[in-house]
Amino acid sequence: MLRVVLRSYQFHRTRLALVVGAIAVGVAFLAGTFVLSDTDHTSIAQTTELAYSHVAVAVEGGYSSSYLPGTGHHVPVPETLERVVDAVPGVVRTAGVAEGYAQLVSPSGSLIGPTASALGTSVAADPALNPFVLDRGHEPGAADQVVVDVNTVRAQGWHLGQHVRIVTDEPVRAFTLVGIVSSRNSTDVVGSTLVGFTPATAHAVLGLKGQDSVVLVTAARGVRDGALAARLRSAVGPDDLALSGSQFVAQNVMYASTGAPQFSLVLDVVLGLALFVCSLVIFNIVSIMVAQRRSELAMLQCLGASRLQIWSSVVAEGAVIGLLASAAGLALGTLGAWLLQGVVSSGGVQSSGAGLVVGTRTVAVCLGVGTVVTAVASVIPAVAASRTPPIGALRRDVLTRAEEDAARAKHSGFVLMACGSPFLVVGLLLNRGGQEEIWIVGIGLVLFLVGLGRVSPLTVPPLVGALGWPIARFGGLPGDLGRQNTTRDARRTVATATSLIVGVGLVSVLAVMETSAERSNDSQIAQALTANFEVLHAGSGPLSAGSAASSPLSPEVLSKLAAQRGLVVSPYSFVNFRGGWGVAVDPGTIGRMADFGTVHGDLGALAQGGFAVSSQIAASSHLHLGEKVRFRFFDQLLSGASTVLRLDATYSQGDLALSGFIFSSTSLGKAAAPLELSAVLVRAGPGVDRAAASRLVTRALGGFPDVSVQSPAQVQAAEDRQVASRLDVISVLLVLAVLVAVLGVVNTMGLAMVERTRELAMLRAVGMTRDQLRTMVRAEATLIGVVGALLGVALGVFVGWAFQRALSTTQGITELVVPWSRLVLYVVGGAVIGFVAGTIPARGAARVNMLDAIASE
């Protein structure tokens, strides 16, 4: 059997090369996706590990998922905690570190670097506990001295002794540059820009008077980090965290490399899609190859080969081909990742520039998936062929076998769709945003889509009949033959277009989700935000992004705005409590800034010590008006205190509804520590138009370069940018999916032409010219491209609808918007891809030697 397989390769070298190429393209998408994500993650991990390599334990306050440790969003601990930590056996040195927002200002007044990762920190007395090393100069020794990272100094052309301007929670101040710092063994630092102050100055300007962001600890020789962390947990109590050095680094890496913990789930979904696309492309192309060898396998049975011999030879053949093709795909995917590496970056910290990362997981998964899927895809059609009587397989023509295969596929497809539909319907109807509903929808969607793929050949004849008439009308006989060839074997048409269907489908899902999320955000803001302006820190994200994306404003901003006659202002502060987060507002003015829809109860009663929740949270948590709830706000966690508040109101909508909980800033300020100002909502007062109000706001905030003033339209634009930024990495990774689609169509078309060599030669023998043959193949390829794009768009709209329904409760995507103009472009692009993909096979078909081709079969 081995000799037979090798002889088959010798006579079908072109077919073998095309199959290997198709598998390599599928593996390339998987490899490129893994390499891109691993490179970004590893680059940040190396910088972070170097920065905190000497830290044995880090002690910080308890936090909820809305806090981003390591990025200036630590839950603070009292400075007195450092003495408690220092007294624990095994602790050698401690350093209470103050971290927060501090951004450098250029001479022109613009902010330097991304605001979201502009880090200010105190310089510890022990150099080992600083996330940087001193390159030149000296550490700050006075209140007006700072050190700055080397990359910023180089980019701005600064020098030691120069005065630099920095904005923090306070207005812009001038400091003297006395030192230049970098990370260990690298010029990179933790943060896009880094400014180091004296401890006293850092506590004052970063809003941490009497508090530390984190306490870093070094251990005595022989004391393990984990053991010391366990001792410190007992010493500091249950409301603070004692993380080992490795845990602290891993925590910082996770948040810096994904931007938010929820985004890691998005990357997992993308990797899962890459695995699915890779497996589907391989399974499809190898199934075609083996199915087209049915007559060859039947001949082997006639000559005495047993079924076991046929199965084992096909599996071994598939495994060898899969291994070789997977290795080629791994190399191709790595090359693609290298080309796209500069596009994908998290921006959380500076990249370490360690180069492309091809991890063990990437190699193992790519080689394993390519080999196993190829072997499985080979044996399934081989088993089907072995069940057919050998003489019957030799005598029956292609059309009869295609009809039987189509009938079996249609039957199994309808069964799978029937099995998946109940799961899909039940999950979408429940739509409560719980894990159970997500799993139900996921199971139903997978079963339904697999079944849909099995019955999709039924859609080819009507689609080609409706879309192919211009080709048949203006392309003459070659065009009409191309249309007939497309419908003659619908399974082959769908198989050829599979990679294009998947690629266009993924891009269409992304388009539907992006437009739906943007329209939902815009609609909610238009309905809920009645203020004329939102005043935010320049580095803050939209208010709906929560406290994790917020940087505090100076209290002077509120004072300046409130001093302007003709303006009505309402302060807005994020608050965090154990288990969640909410906002604190002024009940007397918030009603003029936002429309809360249907309100049950009295929002004004919040001033007497109550709170309000959205109707969704009230229903899911079984809360009722008048019910009392105990909250432990993070400032209270330091002292072990808590506050009992009464539920005074529920509301159905509002720009504030995404936070879920609303408190009174007055009553909460008395119960807990003073609140940080997150935003100010501004509205024109009686007799003042918006233009005059805008001038008043501009005049009040003239001395605050780090403050952003947004109109409702600008708020909508910021929300849209937030949505787009969440999808940027996915968009780049989907470029690989489209590339796979293009190469997959080209490869499969080439394979189809090789398998149809005798058919094409016969057409030449009966009088078809080479130009006519090329026109026929191009017409067929164009129709395959159109059909693939149309089916991909339909698939994308369906999956996008399912995702929108599933996320309407948890993510607020309440409206389904289908970007028809963009989808039409995808269909046109599919036609172009098909035409281009058919050019090379058309030329090869036209060069076929008629007599040799007819005799070869």
Image (cartoon, helix red, strand yellow):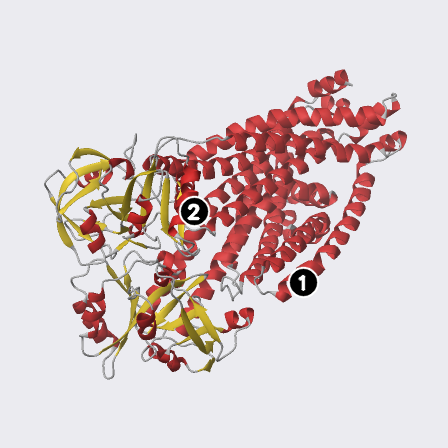
Q: Which mark is residue 591?
A: none
Q: Nearer the viewer, residue 706 or 754?
A: 706
In the drawing, does residue 163 fall left or right of residue 25? left
Q: Which residue is mark 1?
A: 425
How many numbered circles does the render carry?
Answer: 2
Residue 754 drawn above or below residue 90: above
Query: Which amino acid type is marked by label 1?
Result: Val
Q: Quadrant of residue 440?
A: bottom right
Give the mark nearest the N terminus, 1 or 2. 2
Q: Is residue 487 toward the left or the right of residue 652 in the image?
A: right
In the rendered image, the quadrant that contains the C terminus is top right
Q: Residue at x 18, y 78 (%)?
A: 565
Query: Label 2 amino acid?
Result: Thr
Considering the numbered disc 1 on the image, is that residue within a helix, a strand or a loop?
A: helix
| Residue 553: quarter of image | bottom left
Report the front residue among 206 and 516. Answer: 206
Residue 562 position in % (x across, y down): 21, 74
The residue at 45%/31% (across/down) is 357
Q: Is residue 756 visible?
A: no
Residue 21 lies, with reference to residue 60, above or below; the image says above
- Above or below for 466 versus 142: below
Q: Compared with residue 132, is residue 301 higher up or lower down, i.e. above or below?
A: above
* Residue 210 place in picture, x, y as percent: 25, 56
Q: Which residue is mark 2?
A: 258
Quadrant where the N terminus is found in the figure: top right
Check disc 2: other Cα within 10 Å, few if <14, some if 14-19, many if 20+: many
Tag 1–tag 2 contact (CB < 8 Å): no
Figure quadrant of residue 611: bottom left
